[in-house]
Image (cartoon, rainbow, N blue to C red):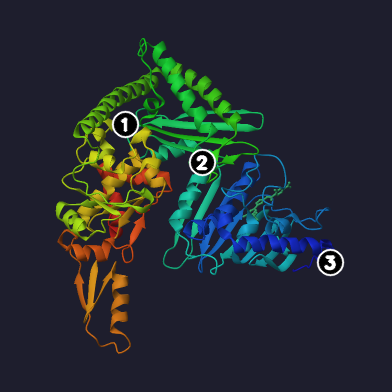
């Protein structure tokens, strides 16, 4: 039975004035979408889904929702459902509107309703359902509540159907279906794996919550169900699944104060890498903040005190924070009211009481844990003390590089062919695989702003090496000195000598290997270089197409076929010669310039590793010691070769 509830909504004229304001609000979102969702590229598109799902997660945090499902339907339509209480539909006195109406038509309305639980108001950009609504070609919301199904419809933020009852139900919950506006987004194709990764992360962060994700598009049907009773403990186990842990059980510490709570899960493995992921109200804080500061301070202090107590550290022996975090995988998750997100990207937690809370519970509970689990304590101490000795060796190696450079009278590596301009914002460095390609690159470059650094021979696998080996390595030191920004803790992007660092390697297995090695090196030892978007891969074309005097290059088969059609023109008869391109080393300087170095014609791919877990995982698998996961990964990804451009 369809019932019109116009009467319960009051007279439409009553809220004419506020309605105008609303339209203005959402128009702003359509005019400058990037301000609200970061960008209109793939990341902004997927952000729409997160904004909707975050509302259901809030309902779960409040204790009223146990199951969320997310589906991609044919036609790039997203459907999100939960089994919560359903968005309130009764008319509020002040506005004359339902909460549901306000949620979808008023900017920044998210998180204003209801009480209890930890209110997570908005994601990274502080926006909510109204932004998604404004940026959707159409959106339908259905609420199951009090025995009825309520429905409201919108198009590009405008109401196309007022709230009405469309049926009876015996469940409660909220259901939102929308199609992103193709005139706003560069591309509205959803990537199943991106949504899957995010939903898995959210399931880890909300222990016990069931989240399913499903792809219903023909030909790519898929479904995954996530539910982790162990929460972030299982997150750590998951991240470490291809690594070798140093102790069997994940250490879990939790505590609360007033209306905040903090939980930490950690486990050491035999690698040299630190993987610390922090969250505030389920929002990833890649730049850390108070909760991370509290964690690091407490871990360092507790391990030093413990080492003294069991007589492993003597006299002036002291472990640094980095020593204590070598090989650690840790998740820090805090939930609080009124989270303050700071910094340019709003990805750093500013609430200083979170530093105190995390520090206090870590100090108290980790100390007890170490006393009760001396074997684990011993393993942690051994790891940190070995790290400490290695760090001392690294310091000496670094010192000796510095002295050598001083003796040489110049600090730039001999193999580097530098450019003339010195303003880093204008210059680029090509790191080139192989001696002959290096020669062609030198001949073909624009010497004003392009520097060339050739690399050859077997490179060090940094995944298996510690910092001290890296400093002394004759393949990597030229890279470090050429970039001029230091390494590890000392890395300072402000000192970079070039703002584009371009890896140029063949599109074959060897090229892909050297790319992986260099990226692993940057990821582990110069992380801000990647995060700052300075690293690029040059994509040399695979094919050369010639018709008469015209030559064109194609990056892949698809482009090749398109260019062939273009060169043939209308008549469709002309003969187009196709040749598979030679390796970089076989190209002459002019060809290399035209295909891979001329800023007008080349194709560069910026390396983006915004998902730290995925990147860590890929590097561990590709470069690590375990053979089985690597085999699996390569088999699964065979058709992309080893594609690191995540
Ligand atoms: F915001 C939204 F429209 F995008 C959206 C909200 C989308 C989805 C899929 C779910 C939700 C949502 C909202 N799920 N559950 C809720 N719950 C409430 O809004 C709610 C219900 C009852 C009460 C109450 O105090 O009785 C309070 C709230 C906030």
Q: Position of residue 408 (x, y in %)?
A: 19, 34
Decide which of tag 1 and tag 2 comes sooner along the chain.
Answer: 1
Residue where numbered disc 3 is placed: 13
Mark 1 or 2: the one toward you: 2
Instruction: Tell me: 8 left or right of 151.
Output: right
Q: CA distance from mark 3 to mark 2?
A: 45 Å
Instruction: Tell me: 570 left or right of 129.
Output: left
Mark 1 or 3: the one toward you: 3
Instruction: Tell me: 581 left or right of 14.
Output: left
The dot on residue 270 is 1
Extreme residue in the bottom direction: 571
In the foreground, 510 or 56: 510
Whether tag 1 and tag 3 are in contact, CB under 8 A, the answer is no
Q: Is residue 624 visible?
A: no
Neighbor class of circle 3 (other Cα within 10 Å; few <14, some 14-19, many 20+) is few
Q: Is mark 3 within 8 Å of ligand 1?
A: no
């Amino acid at each position: 039975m369809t019932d019109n509830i116009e009467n319960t909504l009051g007279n439409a004229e009553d809220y004419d004035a506020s309605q105008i304001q609303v339209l203005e609000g959402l128009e702003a979102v359509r005019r400058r979408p990037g301000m609200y969702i970061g960008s209109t590229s793939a990341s902004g598109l997927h952000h729409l889904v997160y904004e909707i799902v975050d509302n259901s997660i809030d309902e779960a945090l409040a204790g009223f929702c146990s199951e969320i499902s997310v589906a991609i339907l044919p036609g790039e339509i997203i459907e999100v459902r939960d089994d919560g209480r359903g968005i309130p539909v009764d008319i509020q006195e002040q506005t004359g509107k339902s909460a549901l109406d306000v949620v979808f038509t008023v900017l920044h309305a998210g998180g204003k309703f209801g009480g209890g639980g930890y209110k997570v108001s908005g994601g990274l950009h502080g926006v909510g359902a109204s932004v998604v609504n404004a940026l959707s070609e159409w959106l339908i919301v259905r609420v199951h509540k009090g025995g009825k199904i309520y429905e409201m419809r919108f198009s590009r933020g405008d109401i196309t159907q007022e709230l009405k009852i469309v049926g009876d139900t015996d469940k409660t919950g909220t259901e939102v279906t929308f199609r992103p506006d193709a005139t706003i987004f560069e591309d509205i194709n959803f990537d199943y794996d991106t949504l899957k990764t995010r939903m898995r992360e959210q399931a880890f962060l909300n222990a016990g919550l069931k989240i399913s994700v499903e792809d219903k598009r023909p030909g790519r049907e898929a479904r995954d169900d996530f539910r982790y009773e162990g929460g972030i403990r299982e997150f750590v186990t998951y991240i470490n699944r291809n690594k070798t842990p140093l102790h069997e059980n994940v250490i879990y510490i939790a505590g609360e104060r007033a209306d905040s709570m903090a939980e930490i899960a950690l486990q050491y493995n035999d690698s040299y890498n630190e993987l610390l992921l922090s969250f505030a109200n389920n929002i990833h804080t890649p730049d850390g903040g108070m909760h991370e500061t509290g964690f690091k301070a407490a871990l360092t202090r507790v391990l030093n005190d413990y080492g003294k107590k069991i007589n492993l550290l003597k006299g002036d022996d002291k472990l640094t924070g980095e020593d204590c975090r070598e090989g650690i995988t840790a998740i820090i998750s805090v939930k609080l009211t009124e989270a303050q997100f700071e910094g340019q990207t709003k990805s750093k937690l500013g609430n200083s009481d979170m530093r105190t809370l995390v520090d206090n519970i870590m100090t108290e509970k980790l100390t007890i844990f170490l006393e009760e689990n001396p074997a684990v304590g011993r393993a942690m101490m051994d790891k940190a003390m070995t790290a400490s000795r290695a760090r001392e060796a690294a310091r000496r190696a670094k010192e000796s590089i510095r002295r050598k450079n001083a003796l040489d009278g110049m600090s730039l590596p001999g193999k580097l062919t530098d450019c003339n301009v010195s303003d880093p914002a204008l210059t680029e460095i090509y790191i080139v695989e192989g001696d002959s390609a290096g020669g062609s690159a030198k001949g073909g470059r624009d010497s004003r702003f392009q520097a060339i650094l050739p690399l050859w021979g077997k490179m060090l696998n940094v995944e298996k090496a510690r910092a001290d080996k890296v400093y002394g390595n004759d393949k990597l030191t030229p890279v470090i000195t050429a970039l001029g920004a230091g390494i590890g803790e000392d890395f300072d992007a402000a000192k970079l000598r070039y703002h584009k660092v371009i890896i140029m390697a063949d599109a074959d297995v060897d090229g892909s290997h050297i790319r992986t090695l260099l990226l692993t090196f940057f990821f582990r030892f110069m992380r801000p270089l990647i995060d700052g978007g300075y690293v690029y891969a040059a994509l040399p074309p695979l094919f050369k197409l010639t018709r008469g005097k015209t030559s064109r290059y194609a990056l892949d088969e698809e482009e090749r076929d398109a260019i062939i059609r273009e060169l043939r023109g209308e008549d469709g008869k002309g003969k187009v010669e196709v040749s598979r391109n030679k390796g970089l080393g076989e190209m002459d300087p002019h060809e290399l310039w035209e295909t891979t170095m001329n800023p007008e014609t080349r194709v560069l791919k910026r390396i983006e590793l915004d998902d730290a877990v995925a990147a860590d995982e890929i590097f561990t698998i590709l470069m690590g010691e375990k053979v089985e996961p690597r085999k699996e990964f390569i088999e699964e990804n065979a058709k992309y070769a080893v594609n690191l451009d995540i």
